[in-house]
């Protein structure tokens, strides 16, 4: 049976300009990897990768001869980025690994499509497609595995992992996004035995991979298997002992909120200091700020007042996430009314400012800050019912002489 992929990106003039340039340079270009896989399962294609049977220097020459810009993004590994119109295409020469150390590989370029396919990680990622969309399953197993939603290493799982230990995390991430049912037993055994190799990876790579996994709609099977194989303990040493990720997914589903990787990470962190955890994964400043907002509260979100308080103190998104995490840890249901109360609290604005205190004779300095903090506590404790006039009743300061 012949499989064919379609898509606007496949028909785009910019795409065919790149393919025509490569063909004119003597290459046989084929789409490869994620764009083929995602098109087959009818998911949005984000990155367009092309494999060619000529060395990277030939790729650069072919693109420039056609008037296209060629960016040498990774010549040692055969990768050139072509810019055509507003699109970018990552073009990589067919290659085989000559030497690996678990993080990096020394490669040799080839014209053999089978050798190129055999060095990839999973069978579903070793699918190619011609310029007209005709799928080419070089190894003969990728289409069947993708159809069965089976994430399977090419050849020996242990061998593939020892070439790059990031493949351990990629296995669980791909199962979360593309897998169905139980994971492959031989892959799990290999991951359990080689989990210590994750220490070879940079924390940035680990953090990025874990956030991609946590962004999956249904990551619970993958996370549970990570726990059982000790992969999670090696990837995230700060992970809590109990990870009710399935309960969190159920709570998210109940209120119709989409997956949020930092919400899932906050659940995994448990009682660990979020700054310590975030820095260990080299999170960005924005991610660190979001994670700090999801640190545990010192009170339960149990009623309308506490929900409004949480919304005011942490913001709507973070407080909602904390409610979901609380529900997951207690395996309770989520009261949608509390979600609305959180939004109400997040919309509150403290009605007193420093200028109000100065108008009553208070001098600039620490006293103003202390008084504002006290009045804000009283306002929050009143469930935001005290108005500006009531809050300022009795507030006086010593007038300037």
Image: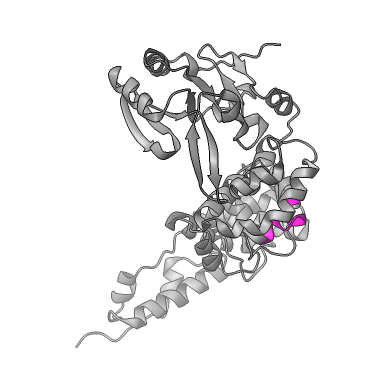
Query: Against 141, is 366 above or below?
Result: below
Q: Is residue 332 magenta?
A: no
Q: Is residue 343 visible?
A: no
Query: Against 126, is 98 above or below?
Result: below
Q: Which residues are magenta?
A: 225-233
Pick whichever, 24 or 285, lies toward us: 24
Horizontal and vertical percent position of residue 130: 54, 15
Task: Look at the image and tell me in which quarter the N terminus lies.
Answer: top right
Horizontal and vertical percent position of residue 296: 61, 66
Horizontal arrangement in the rendering, residue 88 relative to residue 179 (left or right): left
Q: Is residue 188 visible?
A: yes
- The number of numbered discs placed on residues in the rendered structure image is 0
Magenta residues, dominant SS class: helix
Q: How is the image coloured?
A: one colour
Q: Residue furthest left?
A: 401
Pick whichever, 393 or 278, lies toward us: 278
Horizontal arrangement in the rendering, residue 15 relative to residue 165 (left or right): left
At 56% across and 71% down in the image, what residue appears?
381
Horizontal and vertical percent position of residue 370: 41, 80
At 39% across and 29% down in the image, what residue appears?
56
At 80% across and 40% down in the image, what residue appears?
182
Res. 180 image quadrant: top right
Pick whichever, 214 or 169, lies toward us: 169
Query: Against 80, is 241 above or below?
Result: below
Pick whichever, 378 or 95, lies toward us: 95
Res. 133 image quadrant: top right
Horizontal and vertical percent position of residue 217: 66, 40
Q: Is residue 227 magenta?
A: yes
């Amino acid at each position: 049976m012949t499989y064919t992929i379609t898509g606007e990106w496949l028909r785009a003039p910019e795409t065919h300009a790149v393919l025509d340039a490569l063909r004119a340079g003597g290459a046989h270009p084929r789409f490869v990897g994620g764009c083929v896989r995602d098109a087959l399962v009818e998911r949005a294609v984000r990155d367009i990768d092309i494999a060619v049977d000529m060395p990277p220097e030939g790729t650069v020459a072919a693109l420039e001869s056609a008037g296209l810009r060629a960016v040498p993004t990774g010549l040692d590994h055969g990768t050139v980025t072509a810019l055509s119109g507003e699109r970018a295409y990552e073009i990589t020469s067919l290659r085989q690994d000559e030497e690996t150390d678990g993080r990096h590989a020394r490669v040799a370029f080839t014209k053999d499509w089978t050798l190129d396919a055999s060095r990839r990680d999973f069978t579903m990622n070793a699918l190619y497609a011609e310029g007209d969309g005709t799928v080419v399953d070089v190894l003969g197993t990728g289409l069947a595995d993708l159809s069965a939603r089976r994430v399977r290493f090419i050849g020996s799982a242990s061998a593939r992992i020892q070439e790059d230990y990031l493949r351990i995390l990629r296995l669980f991430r791909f199962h979360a996004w593309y897998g169905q049912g139980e994971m492959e037993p031989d892959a799990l055994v290999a991951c359990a035995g080689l989990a210590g190799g994750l220490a070879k990876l940079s924390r940035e790579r680990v953090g990025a991979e874990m956030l991609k996994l946590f962004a999956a709609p249904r990551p619970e099977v993958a996370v549970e298997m990570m726990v059982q194989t000790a992969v999670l303990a090696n990837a995230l040493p700060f992970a809590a002992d109990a990870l009710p990720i399935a309960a969190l997914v159920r709570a998210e589903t109940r209120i119709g909120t989409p997956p949020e990787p930092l919400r899932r990470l906050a659940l995994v962190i448990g009682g660990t200091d979020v700054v310590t955890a975030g820095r260990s994964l080299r999170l960005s400043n924005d991610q660190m700020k979001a994670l700090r907002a999801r640190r545990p509260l010192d009170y339960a979100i149990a009623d309308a007042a506490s929900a409004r308080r949480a919304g005011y103190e942490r913001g709507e998104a973070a407080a909602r996430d904390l409610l979901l995490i609380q529900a997951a840890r207690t395996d309770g249901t989520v009261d949608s009314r509390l979600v609305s109360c959180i939004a109400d609290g997040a919309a509150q604005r403290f009605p007193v400012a420093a200028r109000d205190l100065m108008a009553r004779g208070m001098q600039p300095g620490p006293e103003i800050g202390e008084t504002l903090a006290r009045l804000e506590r009283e306002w929050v404790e009143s469930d935001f019912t005290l108005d500006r006039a009531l809050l300022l009743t009795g507030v006086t300061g010593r007038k300037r002489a």
